[in-house]
Amino acid sequence: QQQVKQSPQSLIVQKGGISIINCAYENTAFDYFPWYQQFPGKGPALLIAIRPDVSEKKEGRFTISFNKSAKQFSLHIMDSQPGDSATYFCAASKGNRDDKIIFGKGTRLHILP
Amino acid sequence: KAGVTQTPRYLIKTRGQQVTLSCSPISGHRSVSWYQQTPGQGLQFLFEYFSETQRNKGNFPGRFSGRQFSNSRSEMNVSTLELGDSALYLCASSKQGIQETQYFGPGTRLLVL
C-alpha cells in the first residue's frame, strides 16, 4: 500500500517532443505528489508538486496531470530540450504526523538533439 | 543564500565499522530529512528531524540513527556497517517539513568494503 510505481524506466524523446512519465499509487491517504529532477552527481531538485484537490498544475514547460479516481499522476515535459536529460522521480507523501515520503524508482530521460 | 552542504562527500569503510555523516541545512530551515539512494532500491526515506526532534522515520533498521542540533545541523550515524549500506546518502532541508520544497545536498557517497 505504500508503493509508488513509476514508468517507464527509461525514455528517449526527440528534441521538441513531449516527454511523458507516469506514476501510480495505492494509498489514498497520500496528499502531496512532487516530482524531482536529478542530474548526475547532484542531489534531486523539486520540479513541481500537486495536491489532490486539483487535476492539473503547470509551471513553464512542465505539467502534472492528476487522476484521483485512478490513483495516477503524470509529468508532461513539453518542447523537450537536451538540457532536460536527467533522471526524474515521482513521489507521494501523507501529511500530519505520518509525514513520510515514498519515491518511485525513477525514469532516465534522454532528449536527442 | 548557501545551499545544503554535506560532509564528507566520499567515504570508504569496512564491514562492522560505524560512520557519521553531517548535513548543514539552508539558513532558516528547521526540517532536515535523510535519504538513501541505491541503483536497486532507488531513493528511500530514512528519517526527518525538526527542531532537534525526530518527527518521522522510514523502514530502516535501528543501525541507522540521527540527530539534530540547535542550529538545525544534522548528523546521521550508521553502526555495524554492512556491504548493502553502500549508497549515496542525501540530506534535504526545508522550512517546515517534507510537504513543501525540499532542497537537497549533493550527498555523501559511502562505499563499504
Image: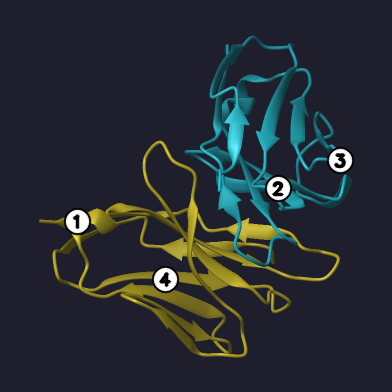
Q: Distance between the residues labelled 2 and 1?
A: 31 Å
**Residue underneath mark 3:** B70
Amino acid identity at mark 4: Asn
Measure the alpha-carbon separation of dots 1 and 4: 20 Å
Which numbered mark, 3 or 2, is in the foreground of this view?
3
Q: Disc number at residue B33?
A: 2
Check if mark 1 and mark 3 are on a common chain: no
Residue identifier under label 1 = A82
Q: What residue type is labelled 2?
A: Ser
Q: How far apart are marks 1 and 3 (CA)?
A: 43 Å
Q: How many labels does the image show?
A: 4
Quadrant (top left, top right, bottom left, bottom right) of the C terminus of chain B: top right
Q: In this figure, which residue is indicated by the disc labeled 4?
A: A22
Q: Of residues A49 and A67, which is closer to you in this image? A: A49
**Marks 3 and 2, how far apart at CA:** 15 Å
Instruction: Report if the CB atoms under discs 3 and 2 are less than 8 Å apart.
Output: no
Secondary structure at badge 2 equals strand
Q: Colour of chain A?
A: yellow
Q: Identify residue type, mark 3.
A: Ser
Chain of the residue under the numbered disc 2 shown in the image: B
- Observer-side mark, 3 or 4, equals 3
**Residue A67: image tag:** none
In terms of secondary structure, where does tag 3 sit?
loop
* Camera-side mark, 1 or 3: 3
- Label pair 2/1, CB-CB below 8 angstroms: no
Subunit of mark 4?
Answer: A
